[in-house]
Amino acid sequence: MPVLFVNKERVDIASNVPGDTPLLWLLRDSLKLTGTKYGCGIAACGACVVYVEGQPVRSCRTPLSSLRQGAEITTIEGLKTKEARAVQAAWVKLDVPQCGFCQSGQVMSAAALLAKNRRPTDADIDAAMSANLCRCATYVRIRAAIKEAAKALA
């Protein structure tokens, strides 16, 4: 029986769960962690971003069979880093979301960027966030919030 650690909690995956099941469906349907969203199903929008072993991945296209035994998965519900707290505070301060649908993926990607680069340029932000789509087009506020979060972390 495969074992994962989701938000630091052990998850035993039943042997009858097909290996080609996307990680997203395990998170949302089995574990009821609905902060990770289904947006497109083809890894193009970023609404489904989670961390696998600390790296952002598109959970809609990550089959369970691709995960190593004991892999560490972090969802928006379990994101507790100082970068995440700074990003979330900046999101609220600058009133980033409109519909909010893409926000968990945006926050996950922004926190990953700031974990690697505490002083991102506009080009760094654009590159890191380019695969995260916002249907409401709040890209200017997203960039400003990332800069605000970076300032808070300095």
Image (cartoon, rainbow, N blue to C red):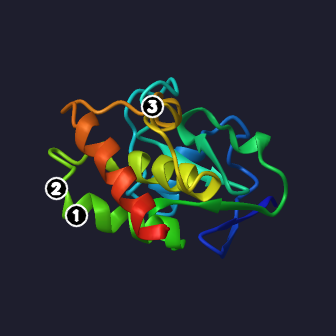
Q: Is residue 31 above or below residue 48?
A: below
Q: Could you give the CA–CA distance between mark 1 and mark 2, rounded to whole angstroms?
A: 5 Å
Q: Amino acid at mark 3?
A: Asp
Check contact, mark 1 vs mark 2: CB within 8 A.
yes
Report crowding for label 3: few under 14, some 14 to 19, many 20 or more residues within 10 A (C-alpha): some
Q: Amino acid at mark 1?
A: Val
Q: Residue at x 65, y 59 (%)?
A: 73
Determine which residue is flagged by label 3.
Answer: 126
Q: Disc 3 on helix, strand or loop?
A: helix
> 75 or 112: which is nearer to us?
112
Say left or right for 143 vs 41: left
Residue 77 in picture, x, y percent from top left:
45, 67
Q: Nearer the viewer, mark 3 or mark 2?
A: 3
Report crowding for label 2: few under 14, some 14 to 19, many 20 or more residues within 10 A (C-alpha): few
Determine which residue is flagged by label 1.
Answer: 92
Q: Is residue 29 above or below residue 102?
A: below
Q: Residue at x 34, y 42 (%)?
A: 143
Say left or right for 151 vs 26: left
Q: Could you give the CA–CA distance between mark 3 and mark 2, rounded to whole angstroms?
A: 19 Å
Q: Residue at x 20, y 49 (%)?
A: 97
Quadrant for the N terminus in the image: bottom right
Check contact, mark 1 vs mark 3: CB within 8 A.
no
Q: Is residue 149 above or below residue 45?
A: below
> 89 or 108: which is nearer to us?
89
Determine which residue is flagged by label 2.
Answer: 95
| Residue 26 appears in the picture as rendered | no
Residue 132 in picture, x, y percent from top left:
42, 33
Q: Residue at x 31, y 68 (%)?
A: 89
